[in-house]
Amino acid sequence: MKISARNQLKGTITNVAEGAVNGVVTIDLGGNTVKADITMESINELGLAEGKEAFAIIKATNVMFATGTERIAGISARNQLAGKVVKVTKGAVNGHVTVELPDGNRVSGSITNAAIEDLGLTEGGDALAIIKATDVIVGVE
């Protein structure tokens, strides 16, 4: 299966916190973790459990950015991945920013050119890729 989501990060499930309707799946990417808030029905249908390999799939439009590498306190987004900006491509109105994490994974996001400029996102700069747990899709092979 091929999909259009730009971010397909492979890792190992380290925790499944089960709830009545939804659960939170934690995927270790090899130095960073991503949390996905998905339905219990999906968790059961996919057979998600600790130790199983899985993909954290994130559309580029669901990635936000902040400058620096310090986690932002007082924000509901569970996933804050620090790294270096390795690519900035501007279009007519929106652009793409790619951040490389210390473990070598890359996270790309689509934001406005104005946001790129206002934040001063340039290649070589520090940035946080911020993703809500509800915006992470979990896939298995």
Image: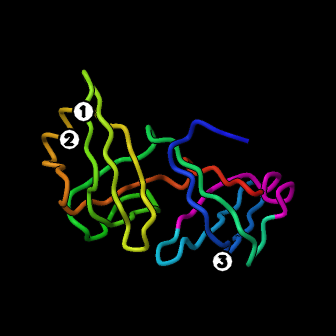
Tag in front: 2 or 1:
1
Residue shown at the point (54%, 55%) measured from the top left: 133
What is the C-alpha distance between the residues marked 3 and 1?
A: 37 Å
Q: Position of residue 15 (x, y in %)?
A: 67, 75
Please report the bounds of the magenta region as a residue range: 34-47
Question: Sequence-wise, which precedes: disc 3 or disc 1?
Answer: 3
Viewer-closest of 132 and 73: 132
Is 30 situated above or below 121? below
Amino acid found under the numbered disc labelled 2? Ile
Examine the structure image and report whether residue 38 is included in the region drawn in magenta.
yes
Residue at screen point 84% across, 63% down: 47
For label 1, the residue is 90
Q: Residues within 10 Å of mark 1 (few under 14, many from 20)?
A: some
Q: Residues within 10 Å of mark 3 (few under 14, many from 20)?
A: some
Of the residues shown, which amino acid type is indicated by label 3?
Answer: Thr
Q: Which residue is mark 3?
A: 14
**Left or right relative to 56: residue 40:** right
Q: Quadrant of the N terminus?
A: top right
Name the one closer to the observer, 3 or 51. 3
The figure's colour scheme reads rainbow
Residue 34 x %, y %: 53, 65
**Mark drawn on residue 48:** none
At mark 1, the secondary structure is strand
Compare marks 2 and 1 and give the one earlier in the sequence: 1
Secondary structure at badge 3 equals strand
Disc 2 + disc 1, Cβ < 8 Å: yes
Give the residue number, with chain letter if any, for mark 2.
116
